[in-house]
Amino acid sequence: ASSEPDLMTLGGGVTTLYYTGTGIALNLRTTSLNIGKFLLQGTTSATGGVKMGDKSGGGATSAQDYHFYDMAITGFRKTGGYGLIYDPQSNNSFSVFDRVSFNWNYDNVVATFTTGFSTVQRYNNCKFQFATRYGFWSDGGTVHTFEFFSPLFQHNGADAIKFKEGSGAYTMYTPYFETNNTTTAGRTVGFSVGGPQYTPQRSSCMYNPTFISNAGQTVSELFMDNVAGFHMFGGLIQNDSSVARYMLELGDSQSNGVSRNVTLDGFELVRNAGIAST
């Protein structure tokens, strides 16, 4: 995997949008949107790149049937900022991202819901890399079926993916993780990490993932706490750290529930790799 941001590989007709304001570059308050073939460039002063739905701003209560394709969102590095965020009060449904790169943002994608929810979000061949903090961040709410097909997560400052709490179903096919947690110690992927976790993560799957750890990594690559249904089939988990450590970890920090119905089958552990239940 490259150490430099390969934003996208496109033909002609690509538009570059430079946002120099301090708010949100694209605030989408409609349904049935087809948008692509552009580079959205932000700054350290901007709150975010794209917001899907905006119920609080008087827009549609449903943000659905969006199709993003052949585009990149980069440079929104203000603390607490993001490349793309789902409006926490809107119902986000049936959106597809084809070959979209999220690079060099504070958080690349944020999916946290309060009164809203998400149904069927599909990411095809997308990149989540070089974030100051998280490649993908979710902190509560109801999420139904986030699907990732051949995603790349690399060189994010903290976790590549962090699902803090809330119910949800996440499915990943052949995801590739390399050299995350470059500035902040943590796990490459964490399910229900921190927070009360009153509602467990449910029915999440990984098929043939590849984990190549950061050389300075000291904790597990994949962590699950209060998960009701997680399944991983095939794949490779490789420890490039000099520290002998557990690569998969099942936590039980909450009195309200334990991790259960977990299936791990047919994967390969390389170099000081093991499994722990804590």
Image (cartoon, rainbow, N blue to C red):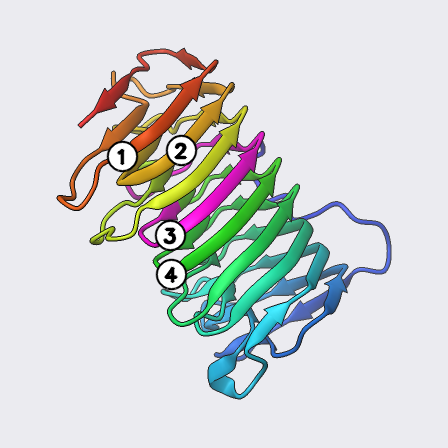
Dot 3 falls on a residue whose secondary structure is: strand
Q: Are marks 3 and 4 in contact (CB under 8 Å)?
A: no
Q: Residue beneath label 3, please?
A: 167
> Label 3, label 4: how many angstroms apart (C-alpha)?
6 Å
Dot 2 falls on a residue whose secondary structure is: strand
Residue 21 visible, this angle:
yes
Dot 1 falls on a residue whose secondary structure is: loop
Left or right: where 9 falls relative to 138: right
> Label 2, label 4: how many angstroms apart (C-alpha)?
19 Å
Q: Residue beneath label 1, please?
A: 259
Q: Are marks 2 and 1 in contact (CB under 8 Å)?
A: yes
> Which range is magenta?
162-186
Determine the residue positioned at 31% across, 51% down.
164
- Who is closer to the viewer here, 75 or 253? 253
Q: Residue beneath label 4, please?
A: 141
**Disc 1: CA contacts within 10 A as few (<14), some (14-19) or many (>=20):** many
> Label 3, label 2: how many angstroms apart (C-alpha)?
13 Å
> Label 1, label 4: how many angstroms apart (C-alpha)?
19 Å
